[in-house]
Image (cartoon, rainbow, N blue to C red):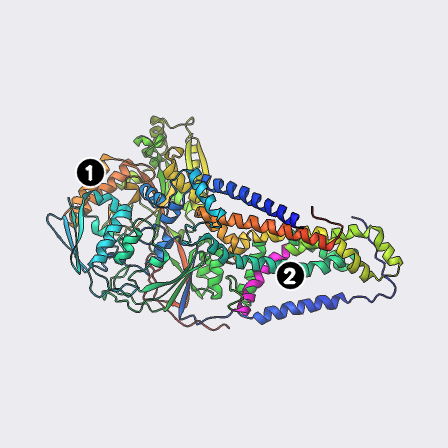
Amino acid sequence: MSHVIFRRGRDLVITLLLVGTLMFFVVHLLPGNPAIAMLGSYATEDQVRQLTHALGLDQPLLSQYGLWLGHVVKGNLGDSIGFQQPVTTVLAEHLGPTALLAVASTVISLVVSVPLAAYTAARPGSWWTRVLTPLSVFGIAVPNFWLALVLIIVFGVALRVLPIAGYVSPLTDLPSAVSHLILPVVVLVAGQAALFVRTLRESMLGELLALYPRTARAKGASERVVILGQLLPNALIPLLTVVGTSLGTLLGGIVIVENVFVIPGFGALLFQAINSRDYPLVEGITLAIALGYVLINLVVDLLYTAIDPRVRIR
Amino acid sequence: MTGSPRRRSPGARPVNHHRLVGALLVGLVALVAGCGTPPQEDTTQRLTAAIPGDPVSLDWGLNTDALTIDIAQNIFEPLFAADRTWQPKPMLADGYTLTEGNTVYTIPIRRDVTFHNGQPMGAADVVASLNRWFTISGQAQLIKSALRGVQQLDPYTVQVRFDRPQRSFIPDLASLVQPCIVLPAAIAEAAGAKPLTDAQIIGTGPYQLERFVHGQYVDLRRFPGYRSRTEDWGGLNGRKVARIPQLRFRVVTDSTVRLNGLSTGQWQYAQSLDSDFYDLITGNTELTGLPERSSLIEFLLINSGAGPFRSLAARQGLNQLLDKRALAEATLGPAKLWEPLTGQFAFPDDAAMYSTAGMDTYRAHDPAQASQLLSSAGVGPNSPIRILTTHTYQNYYQMAVVVQSELRSIGISAQLQVYDFPTMVSKLSSDPGSWDLSMTSFAGEIMAPTQVLFLTPKWPGGYRSAAMDAAIAQYEASADDAAAKAAIDRIQAVVWQEVPDIGIGKQVKLDAVTHQVRDYQNFVGQGFWNAYLAPARTAD
């Protein structure tokens, strides 16, 4: 196990180094300049030059890279140019809303999708299955910004039962936090749950072709025991992969949903950082997202072994 | 997909799925009902304004963007500031005297002013703020070469000496963009050319910064130590009373959400709404649309420093080609939200700067003569015009398409180069050889020709002209208002003759407020002093 952890740790460092380096040069190659963002579009060339110098952005790119890398190795991601705060502080402030949204929507999606997938796999000809199958296609196909605007108009503007935008931390006001989260979570669940249902259903249908369900039934096992006790665990691995990827993507920033619902998460932050050419912040966000992806993949790998002992991490 | 066994094992009890689904639905309804109407705070105590973006900085002295100006005018005050007719009037100054051949400004300052940190304002603070202004302000750079020095005469008087008369000095101190805001001396000296940090946002205005959560909101609260002027000057000056205890400027990037939040009472002010919403707002009795009285002039930016439009004939030909009114109609939204422009660099209500001298040149629209002029300058089908534009502001893109079409109508090829806005701005200044035409907006209410950015050196486009330099020098040397007005007429005539840029129209930004907001002065940006909030109406 220690060997696995060491190798994964090594891979993590290499991944972060590659991603960080690539992103450093990509953002610096973009036209634009943080000084222009800070001074505004009516700033003169002299003013831009003066501030660029004051910010140290007129140094050769390689020496800027060396400086940045030296700091990153020590765990210092630098200061955000726009926020005037350490990048780590900015990231910590924006991680909470995104993590809450991502985890809440993933958990709810799982809670909704597992029974639905089990039901539709067990009863492919039933009325509910005929309704749910195209509905899951709709859930995947519908653009989330459209669904968000429809929900805002119905529940926020017409019925006025839910706030249309904003974020409240659950630590400060739980009921208000829940009311602010309902619409964005519903938007995310619509797409995610539909994907989970389809993935799990396909996987379960595949398992149904195997011999062991027939053997179980022949031994007198109830249909519920066959479906929930034997088929479902074996069919979970593909779902786990999809859940891991989906969660990683959500943690990486739910740009549209966060912008529409005015949630100060990673997506909105990344959008803002790129627009203002806040180099240290873009690099910090990218590293954080890469770290999140790698860690989630590690957890998914470990869960594989827990679900199916035949799987071994090498 | 293959079929799957549907056999139920003997004795298995059927699951009541309908009951399960019903329970889930009841749970969801209960959850929504439990949340009920979003909690409403006492809406007479805090005004929330939804703004379309995050101000990068609140440093009004340095940052030139509207978002900064909109918020910071509640926090900072300049030495001089515009009144409602766009005339500079003393704000923190107590007037000024001009001596020694109009080269020495002696400026007494008010004695009752306190900074937000509790420190009284004195001449040392004003000297430090003036020194910073001469370092960072674009307008100040234009007159800095004539500056001999800034000094404190006594604890409440400062003196600024020039080598030669500089009529634009006082108007430039009061400029809407990069005015001379007064800071505590220690802060002004520490900040220098860098933007003020949030901790350095210490002004003298009716509101002080409470919290700036970047990317989310800016909270201001009433400054209890504020001492107002008593004059009813309006604009950015005169009597100011912070009647609303707290202001929140909340970043809401989506225009639809800004409107929806206004409709539901989540905020009371929404800035920069889509012009398509105009009818929706005017049809809603709870809302009032506020076409901003002071707004921007949309300009076609011409690269006079490189490429085909270095030629005066080419620029004059372009002016003859473009039907400015049609261009405005096609790009500036509903008729109620733009006004045709007669080409001035100032609006008619800005009497000191407005001029119609030589207007016929601007109005001329003759594609045949345009074709001749452009052809004589070597502009034709084999020399494509490069139009730099952006999708970030849709009207810029539409303007580019219309200009491309008009050029093609006389056989001149034109290519669009479309980028995001930061890239476009960067290319305008850092890559002047890469474009021929572009788009920009300028404030139409100015107080001196130094504030007309395209006339200033180093503005993208590289316009240089001996005739213009002479006209501006005439303005700077003018001893009285009549002489200054004559110089303005001359400058305007040169603009139309030499076509550094082409004004298209005044585009009015559409803001909206709920019925709660009263006595709001719709001037420029969101100066919320003197406004108050009436209680919200109860829902039916």
Q: Position of residue A213 (x, y in %)?
A: 84, 55
Q: Label 2, label 1: how many angstroms apart (C-alpha)?
A: 72 Å
Q: Position of residue A171 (x, y in %)?
A: 52, 67
Residue at (70% x, 55% y) in the render: A197
Cβ atoms at labels 2 and 1 below 8 Å apart? no
Q: Are marks 2 and 1 on the same chain?
A: no
Amino acid type indicated by mark 1: Ala
Is label 2 in a helix, a strand or a loop?
Answer: helix
- Please, which chain is the residue tagged with disc 2 on? A
Q: In the image, which is nearer the foreground, mark 2 or mark 1?
A: 2
Query: To which residue does mark 1 refer?
Result: B470
Between residues A188 and A50, which one lies in front from this camera angle?
Answer: A50
Query: To which residue does mark 2 refer?
Result: A108
Label 2 crowd bin: few (<14), some (14–19), many (20+), radius 10 Å: some
Amino acid type indicated by mark 2: Ile
Residue B275 appears in the picture as rendered: yes
- Please, which chain is the residue tagged with disc 1 on? B
Residue A274 appears in the picture as rendered: no
In the displayed structure image, the side of residue A120 where residue B118 appears, left or right? left
B217 part of magenta stretch:
no
Q: Which residues are magenta?
A: A173-191
